Image: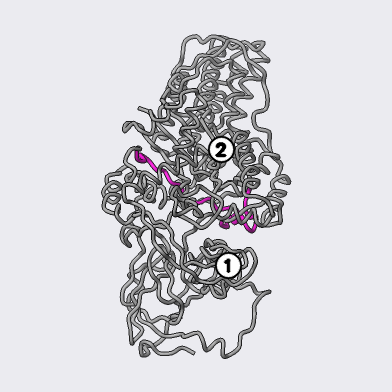
Amino acid sequence: MKILVTSALPYANGEIHLGHLAGAYLPADIYVRYHRLKGNDIIYICGSDEHGVPITIAADKQKVSPQVIVDKYHNSIKESFEKFGCSFDNYSRTSLPLHHKTAQDFFTRIYDKGFIYPKTISQFFCHACNMFLADRYVTGTCPHCENDKARGDQCEKCGRWLEPFNLIEPKCKTCGAQPEELKTTHYFFKLSQFQDTLKKWIGEKTNWKDNVKKFCQGWFAQGLEDRAITRDLTWGVKVPLKEAQNKVLYVWFDAPIGYISSTKEWAEKKGKPDLWKDYWLDSKTKLVHFIGKDNIVFHAMVWPAMLFAHGDYILPSEIPANEFLNLEGRKLSTSENWAVWLPEYLKEFEPDPLRYALAVNLPENRDIDFAWRDFLARNNNELADVLGNFINRVATFINKNYNGNIPENHKFTESDNEVLIKIEDTTKKVGELIEPFQIKDAIRELMTLPNLGNRYFDYQAPWQSFKTDRNKCDTTINVCARVIASLSVILEPFLPFTADKIKKLIQIQSKAWDEAQNPKFGKTLGPVSILFPKIEEKVINTQIDKLGKKTTTETEPKKEAVPTTSVVKIEDVKKEKQMEITFDDFKKIELKTAKILNAERVAATDKLIRMDIDLGTEKRQIVAGIGMAYAPETLIGRNIVVVANLQKAKIRGVESNGMLLAAVDGADISLVILDKDIKTGSSVS
């Protein structure tokens, strides 16, 4: 069986940070390295995503061409990945002519089959810039939180998903002029036509992670809608139609096709230009997409629908989407520099301690926090004091007492055999955990081996048996050498740089995963070095101090985010910037009492609750992010206060017509609930 592994294409408008690594790149690299050691036919494909509005905005800001931006970040990202140990078989880029042709051919194929159609829609046009404005080229005031720097696709302050026409006083991001609403024609992909096909296909994926399946079920419940797949831009893959000369493919349409074009580039580099077909056109190929949860909708629904429409290519076999990595108790924020950037990290530290700290705490099933002091403890207490200590003390003993020569074993005792059995069991268990993407459990299982090695070394006390029972000492050290040799193999997917150092130390000959159960190694030790130097706390304090401060790293927000709340959060208003409003302004807000008639959790979410409410004269539906504080069934019958004249919004595809009031203290949420019965729909003043 062939295995084709991809990681989500990173956006070439900023550097890689820890959230990227934990979501899509480190777990994929571990999985791929393991399968290579198993001798499986596997290739790892990736590349830079170099199209889209954030790229052009960054170029406009710096007054350079988009090509300058993507060249800079593509090269930097690629170099960072190499230094971190990501072992791509091919790392491509979507600005290549090969990708443009592949994407255009893909578009043409499904257009000719009738799955793409033109549709005239309204869009903002800036007369000063003489261009239609994509969503991120429009800024204005958020209708929900009054943030005056909201984008046309999202408000970063309150997290709401917006449309350009939702904004109050919209402006062109480039020149600041007020745009005009005009008609333009775009091309839409018939995603709605694939709802039943996708629902059946995903329903059969009994081995998929729950977060992926539940997310898809939520979208199916709302009904899939056709999606625009073109934009009025000059930067990107040109739409291959004569009547659409000034349009490009939407980045979310052309980016996943980059997996195919990157595989084509890999085949060409190998001198076998048709080799890519052995993977993409063979139904027996296992296609695995490693992504973060923010990419689920595109990889589990839109991309498979595109593949169904095309008809020739294989479909994803696995989509092991990870949750988010937070940083020091807060969500990562690239705009606020609340992030740890990989290039900066690599200037200060070795890659393997970070690979370990992330792998042992991956956000596989829930959001996880990365803390610098936890990183310090992992390096000093686990890598240095357990793994490094075991290998160093054995190597030092051999050099001191055996002149660097590893002794032969004699008769194994019960204690010796327990260690040898543990080597076999650990090798087997680690592999069995990597196969279903349980990376965190795999590395924790692996670390039981050096722990056992230290206990065994202490219990056998070779410093004593060397004087009293040389055969016993020889066997003890030989068994320890077997543990080290085994570790050099099973560590390779997780800590490849450390594994190489250990291989040189033990002169290992075994190169296959299964050989780790009974590894072959040299008779003489190679050079001994400290594998994991201790890190001082003051070094970590320096890293913590960097967070949230200005940096020269140029970044842009993620492509698309999902809103998480519709609760009025008073703490979102910065005290130093509070502004007074007139009584006339306040009178514009229509506050009314309402009764909750029904409440249920929005599918595939933990926080969102959909409620049917009675406003006296009408019934409405609202959505609020209160699911972590209230169970839906406890809300039914409660009398609440809502903002009744707020503009409608869609949250996770669910329409919300109003906003309830609540007090918020960090993670604590308390609804504003009436203390006695009053007529539903009464005004609140």
- Give how far across and how far down residue 503 sits, in percent: 58, 20
Vertical placement of residue 675 versus 239, above or below: below
Question: On the picture, is 97 further left or further right than 71?
Answer: left
Q: Amino acid at mark 1?
A: Cys
The verdict on residue 318 being magenta is yes
x%, y% of residue 391?
60, 24
Q: Quadrant of residue 105?
A: top left
Residue at image coords 41%, 25%: 40
Nearest the camera: 107 or 25? Answer: 107
Please report the bounds of the magenta region as a residue range: 314-340
Q: Residue 243, how many percent across, how many down?
A: 44, 54
Which residue appears farthest toward the front when viewing the image? 242
Q: Nearer the viewer, residue 8 or 602?
A: 8
Query: Within 10 angstroms of label 2, few (less than 14), some, or many (20 or more) residues?
Result: many
Under circle 2, the secondary element is: helix
637 to 309, vertically: above or below: below
Give the side of residue 304 with respect to residue 665, left or right: left
What residue is shown with label 2? 356
- Residue 373 seen from this side: no
Q: Residue at x 34, y 50 (%)?
A: 213
Tell me the residue at 57%/56% (across/down).
557
State whether the magenta stretch is mostly helix, strand or loop: loop
**Mark 2 is on which residue type?**
Tyr
Query: What residue is drawn where x is 36% and y is 53%?
Result: 116
The numbered mark at residue 126 is 1
Foreground pick, 438 / 78: 78
Residue 14 horizontal/vertical position (percent): 62, 49
